[in-house]
Image (cartoon, rainbow, N blue to C red):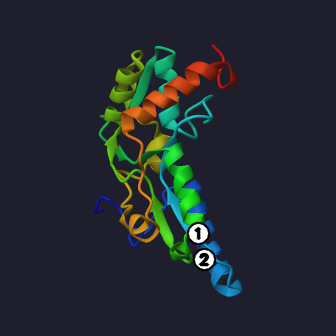
Amino acid sequence: MSLPVDEDHPTNPKGLYAVTNLAAEKMIQVYGDVFKIPATCLRITNTYGARHQMQHDEYGVFNWFVRKALDNEALPVFGDGMIIRDFMYIDDLVECLLMTAQSEAAIGQVFNVGSGRGVTFREIAATIVEVIGSGSYKFTEFTQERAEVEPGDYWADISKITRLVGWRPQTDFSEGIKATAEFYRAHRSHYWED
């Protein structure tokens, strides 16, 4: 696969969640075409930031890592930590949604939405530990279940949405981590128990 991945890259979902996302995209496109309803599809990468589920790592490993660091625990990094992903700060996503909803050029389009930057899980863990000032990270083997659905390296080519809508993420990676940690330090009791 060529990185970063653009919207024209062949899709090959590796799990039910990915299959349902692609099916929803296709249904929206068909509905828009048949009923002439303005529709736009966004392929949103992983997000992190305030108000995210923190009880377990099933729906957001980034914020789970933040929790582990705030609890001064080891962040479990699968394999050698060199798998690449695209993580986007939530405020950037909200701005993207608002701009896209107001853009005539977005109608009928499919857009990748992400930071446009690939980052390894090793770098994510190391940066979180450094910015938060506590925790550590350790390497662990993939479970069979995770290995079966692991899609490999991915980060989004966001040039299309930048060109047509004018959106580009604004949040620096370390600043996003810092803001996330500050939120959870202030509101920890609402998200997980000590």
Q: Which residue is mark 2?
A: 29
Residue 154 sits above or below residue 171 on the image = below
Q: Which residue is mark 1?
A: 25
The secondary structure type at the circle numbered 1 is helix
Disc ID at residue 143:
none
Where's residue 37, x and y in %? 68, 79
Depth order, front residue of 97/109: 97
Q: Quadrant location of residue 131?
A: top left
In depth, the one of 60 and 13 nearer the eye is 60
Q: Amino acid at mark 2?
A: Gln
In screen coordinates, is 100 left or right of 76?
Answer: right
Q: Residues within 10 Å of mark 2 (few under 14, many from 20)?
A: many
On screen, 35 above or below 45? below
Quadrant where the image shows the N terminus: bottom left
Given contact means CB atoms under 8 Å apart, are the residues at marks 1 and 2 in contact?
yes
Is residue 161 rendered to the left or right of residue 127?
A: right
Examine the image and state in which quarter residue 119 appears: top left
- At a point 58% along the width and 61% down the height, the residue shown is 21
> 64 or 169: which is nearer to us?
169
Which kind of residue does numbered mark 1 sit on?
Answer: Glu
